[in-house]
Amino acid sequence: MKQIDSRAYVDPKAQIADNVRIDAFAYIEGDVEIGEGCHIHPFACIRDGARLGKNNEVFENAVIAATPQDFRWKGEESYVRIGDNNKIREQVIINRGVRKGSATVVGNNSFIMAQTHIGHDSEIGDDCVIGNAVKIAGDVKIGNRTILSSNSLVHEKCHIGDLVLIKGGCRVNGHVPPFTVMAHNPISYFGVNAFILKLTKKTEETIEDIAKCYRHVYQTGTSVFNALRRIKEDVEESEERNLIISFIEDHDLVIAAIAMHENEEE
């Protein structure tokens, strides 16, 4: 049974599933779908193009499907697609896609903390934690089980892999491969995300092989091409090793690698 406070505004065209709670002064536009078990707190704004799955909680003054902050957008129909079981805290803003039919996507079971901004056409994976006041630009991709600590900044079109930890206040200006911890400004490799890897039941041997891969990439002073060759020769084949190789082959890691070497020289 729906619980919609009489002081909320809900457009009659909005598709509201059973067992949804909408509190006083929430604002729901017409081209909106809200799945079962969602809770929309006071003063939250769910705008045209929002598609929410089940059991999401949207807190005070959050705006879902805000129009893109991009000069290219000329009113095209676009979306924000949110999966299930997410918590979206106070004053979070999630922009719609900038191209016709495109979408900004949030997966399942993520916790997006207060004052975070997620730009147009970005994709947030499953089981992520996005800290307070994180700013994510457009066309960013963030992998599963990744943590962005408070006040992190992610530049446009960056890809952050699975099981990554970005330390607080970092400016991410390049692609970040999986299983890593990144810190400092300029951003640089800080180590392997061993604590979270252990929580996902990775063995000590697997974690050591991951660390060996990144020693070749970030700590030998060689080129990315030579680092890949050494990984293939030196590290036993595994799902994790292959994922690291494919990520590096598909992305430009030079910026992050250069930043690390510059920090060492200082």
Image (cartoon, rainbow, N blue to C red):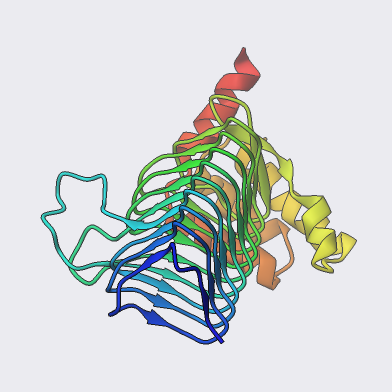
As rendered, which of 180 and 266 lies closer to the eye? 180
Query: Residue reaching furthest left?
Result: 74
Q: Quadrant of the C terminus?
A: top right
Give left or right: position of 239 versus 25: right
Q: Identify whether 184 is placed above or below 57.
A: above
As rendered, which of 177 and 103 lies closer to the eye? 103
Query: Residue reaching furthest right?
Result: 204
Please indicate, yes or no, whether residue 220 appears anywhere in the rendered image.
Answer: no
Please indicate, yes or no, whether residue 182 appears anywhere in the rendered image.
Answer: yes
Query: Residue reaching furthest top?
Result: 266
Q: Position of residue 224 (x, y in %)?
A: 51, 44
Q: Position of residue 71 (x, y in %)?
A: 15, 44
Q: What residue is drawn where x is 30% and y is 78%?
A: 12
Give left or right: position of 33 versus 67: right
As rendered, which of 101 and 116 lies closer to the eye? 116
Give left or right: position of 209 versus 8: right
Q: Identify whether 102 is placed above or below 264.
A: below
Q: Where is residue 227 in the image (x, y as percent from the top left)?
A: 58, 47
